[in-house]
Amino acid sequence: MATIKDVAKLAGVGIATVSRVINNSGYVKTETREKIEKAVKDLSFKPNEIARNMTLQKNDIVAFILPNSTHLFFGELLYSVEEELFKYGYKVMLCNSSEKIEKELVYLNMLRNKIVDAVILLTNNDVESYLDKSLPIISFDRRFTNVPFVASDNYGGGVLAANYLISKGCKKFMFIGDDAQGIHSHVMTEVSKRRVGFIETLEQHGFHDIINIEYPLGDYVVTKEMIKDLVKDYRDVDGIFTVSDAVAHSIVQIYEEMGKNVPNNVKVIGYDGGRSFLNFGKKITSINQDTNAIAIKIRQMIVNYRMQIPNVSQIVPVTISKGDTA
């Protein structure tokens, strides 16, 4: 593989002159530039992109820090963001944090060290004091002071779910989920607004005895046993809204294992989009987050940072995706 030294030798110039041509960072005589460009072509020379861009103080690489790329919605969001940014010349670096703050801080340091151009941050950890807010950071589903964020309309999603269940004749309601959508329940995220919108809308319609269940959702075995207990304790519940499609999926399966029919005996609505990869014979009725629209908002913010245009936080509308469970 050819190096910059090989290019300089073939063109009969110094390495610094080759660097100026490659980086377009200074004056070089037309004749000399043509020699260097020919040498680059003849040797099929490809500059080290990261090293070149660090010299330019830009690199077109965006780090996406998220808890777990195998999470169904996060994986789809990652795909949409990568597709959208690639159209505009950016590359996405995946950073799985496993919800560990020490990993998130390592990844955030890549921004300080100019290894990446911007960071998209999806976290449940208490990282506010660690953020250098003079740098290009975009938060997803979480508010930090002086950091622009993008989120779906979580409150509006709760409103949609409540109104839909009411329209289907439900009388006894339950919300199942945890505010932080993770193990750090002391950290409030935009996700908490799903519950708030749901409960406030029901109360406006005169329903006040609403069952609100909050607990960690990561362990399927624990969740399964808890849901079984809920079915036994609240036999009159006929309308359930959950924090995510994954939770809705578990609830529907458990209800049906116990002889309850969904949606005849109980109606269940998830949140994320009820997409086909959750298909188990029934399509989840769900509040749909438009990952393409979210990705466009994120891309616009990253370009704004590059153009030194102030960013404004964005809320992306949601819709209800009708399925077989409500």
Image (spheres, helix red, strand yellow):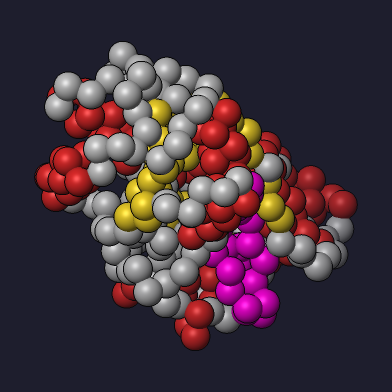
Q: From this viewpoint, which residue is outermost toward the front?
A: 206
Q: Residue 262: percent from the left, percent from the top?
A: 32, 22
Q: Is residue 267 visible?
A: yes
In the image, is 34 to the left or to the right of 3? right
Quarter of the figure that contains the C terminus:
top left
Q: Residue 239: percent from the left, percent from the top?
A: 41, 35
Quarter of the figure that contains the N terminus:
top left
Q: Is residue 147 magenta?
A: yes
Q: Is residue 16 above or below residue 322?
A: below
Determine the residue positioned at 63% across, 56% down: 150
Q: From this viewpoint, which residue is outermost toward the bottom?
A: 129
- Which residue is nearer to you in this view: 12 or 171? 171
Q: Is residue 125 above or below residue 118?
A: below
In the image, is 92 to the left or to the right of 233? right
Q: Is residue 319 magenta?
A: no
Q: Is residue 173 above or below residue 309?
A: above
Q: Is residue 253 above or below residue 309?
A: above
Determine the residue positioned at 67% across, 66% down: 148
* Magenta-drawn segment: 133-157
Determine the residue positioned at 45% across, 77% down: 127
Q: Is residue 115 visible?
A: no
Instruction: Please tell me in which quadrant of the rendered image residue 224 appears.
Output: top left
Determine the residue positioned at 57% across, 81% down: 132
Q: Residue 104: percent from the left, percent from the top?
A: 39, 69
- Which residue is nearer to you in this view: 56 or 127? 127
Q: Residue 295: percent from the left, percent from the top?
A: 63, 43
In the image, is 8 to the left or to the right of 271? right
